[in-house]
Image: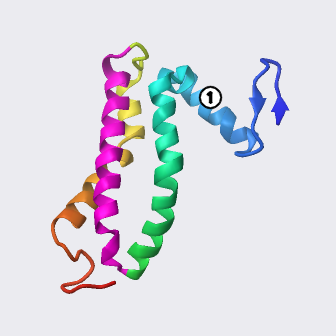
């Protein structure tokens, strides 16, 4: 860990330049990112503990066309859309509302579009990767 003049201690990972970039973005456009209220930190833990392993399995399953990932994908997309809705609500009208709403919406667009696409794909068929069971 490396400390700077503001007594902020940089983590070992990610590199300092990326931490500084996130802090710059937060200070200029996304106040909730800097405030880090408890509910927001909870979404980070959900992402780390549950989504991290899901991503590892999903990458494999999507590349190999495995239908068993369908249910987990629907759960992931549902939770992701819930979290992003809560965060964007805070960004819009909450205590930490952003002064740059359109910029923050655009920065978060992928966190809405991708889960919607995944949910559509997985919900539309019990076998999203083929017409028959593909274990």
Residue 67's image quarter?
bottom left
Q: Position of residue 98 (x, y in %)?
A: 41, 20
- The mark tally for this picture is 1
* Left or right: 104 as drawn, with respect to 93: right
- Residue that badge 1 annotates: 23
Residue 62 screen position, x and y as percent: 39, 73
Q: Where does the image place residue 49, in percent across and percent down from the top left? A: 52, 49
Give yes or no for residue 68 being in the magenta stretch: yes
Please determine whether, in this image, residue 88 is positioned above or below residue 115: above
Secondary structure mainly formed by the magenta segment:
helix
Left or right of 31? Residue 87 is: left
How crowded pointer 1 is (Cα within 10 Å; few <14, some 14-19, many 20+) is rated as some
Numbered range of the magenta stretch = 65-94
Where's the N terminus, which quadrant? top right
Q: Secondary structure at mark 1?
A: helix
Q: Residue at x 35, y 69 (%)?
A: 69
> Foreground: 41 or 30?
41
Residue 67: say if magenta. Answer: yes
Image position, residue 129 (x, y; %) = 27, 79
Q: Which quadrant of the rendered structure holds the C terminus?
A: bottom left
The answer to whether one can see residue 30 in this image is no
The residue at the point 40 percent across, 13 percent down is 95
């Amino acid at each position: 860990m490396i400390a700077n003049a503001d007594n902020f201690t940089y983590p070992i990972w990610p590199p300092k330049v990326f931490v500084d970039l996130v802090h710059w973005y937060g200070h200029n456009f996304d106040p909730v990112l800097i405030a880090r209220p408890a509910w927001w930190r909870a979404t980070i833990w959900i992402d780390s503990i549950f989504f991290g392993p899901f991503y590892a399995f999903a990458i494999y399953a999507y590349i190999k066309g495995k239908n068993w990932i369908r249910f987990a994908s629907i759960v992931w997309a549902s939770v992701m859309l819930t979290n992003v809705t809560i965060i964007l609500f805070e960004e819009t009208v909450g205590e930490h509302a952003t002064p740059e709403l359109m910029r923050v919406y655009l920065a978060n667009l992928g966190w809405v579009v991708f889960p919607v696409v995944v949910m559509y794909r997985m919900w539309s068929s019990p076998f999203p990767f083929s017409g028959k069971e593909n274990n």
